[in-house]
Image (cartoon, rainbow, N blue to C red):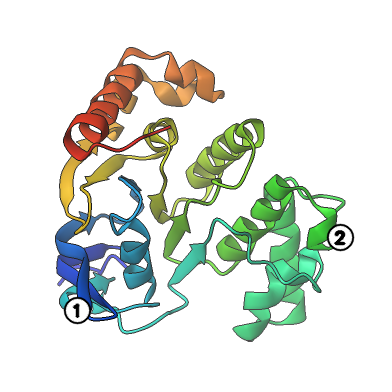
Amino acid sequence: MGEVDLSHIQIESVRRDFRAKDKLISALDGVTLDIKQMEFVAVVGPSGCGKTTLLRLIAGLDFPTSGQIKVGGKEVRGPGPDRAVVFQQFALFPWKTVAQNIAFGLSCKGASQREQNELVEKFVAMMGLDGHENSFPHQLSGGMQQRVAIARSYALAPDVLLMDEPFGALDAQTRTVMQEELKGICRANPRTVLFITHAVDEAVYLADRIVVMSRRPGRIYEVVDVAGPREKEGWDQFKRIEDVMDQPAFIQIRTHIWRLLRDKVNVKVE
């Protein structure tokens, strides 16, 4: 018997219904998806198609009406240290410093003070937060706050990183910088990532595969491969996102997804 891939995500025929007054609303219907260990999967689709619902189900913050979700071969029955979530709103403790925010989960896990200090130092350096260890969230820009949130998640060493439009609240320039930084972090410290976004360019730049979802009830309309074309054209040699966006395969994939969303799903996209 082989080793279990701890970050392998299996989503099997998942349906999620909600009751609003006297009406039953289906957010997801028959979603089946297999996310391999260390794979970066982005999910795009119209507002209300169930993208965030799917992420919450994997996180264990909600439960399917029917179907099953497994992470590392085990059914998800609630939140766990193997999964970390980064939300659009930075969700930092305003009364804690940068260092204290990053260390919070570590202290909850019972890490020693020495271990906390070492990991905080490591991720402060990785996220370019040097000199801000003692700053409070309100003293930081939006981009820096999101760096802290990502550092806090990475410090916990989760097998799976779940990101719900983490750059959606940032201005365009900061968002681009954060995309490039996340790309570099994922190369240096690979994780299985599920990334929710409305921005097609962002999805194509970051992901190995892109899941295109239909209008509610959310179903998977198509799964688009990016890793193959990226490797063939050598995108990883480029450090800047604008250089990657000039590549023929990038343009082809972006156009294909844009047309799917506009013509098949009929949604305004960025």
Q: Residue at x 35, y 35 (%)?
A: 268
Residue 4: x percent and y percent?
25, 69
Q: Is residue 174 visible?
A: yes
- The x, y position of residue 204, in whole percent, is 37, 32
Q: Is residue 250 left or right of residue 134?
A: left
Closest to the observer, 182 or 60: 60
Q: Residues within 10 Å of mark 2 (few under 14, many from 20)?
A: some
Determine which residue is flagged by label 1: 65
Residue positioned most to the front: 22
Please determine whether, in this image, residue 41 is positioned above or below residue 235: below
Write down the residue under mark 2. 135
Residue 134, image quadrant = bottom right
Viewer-nearest of discs 2 and 1: 1
- Inspect the image, locate mark 2, and give the three-letter code of the amino acid beneath it: Ser
Q: Secondary structure at mark 2?
A: loop
Position of 39 with respect to 88 (left or right) is left
Q: Quick one: label 1, few (<14), some, or many (20+) residues within 10 Å?
A: some
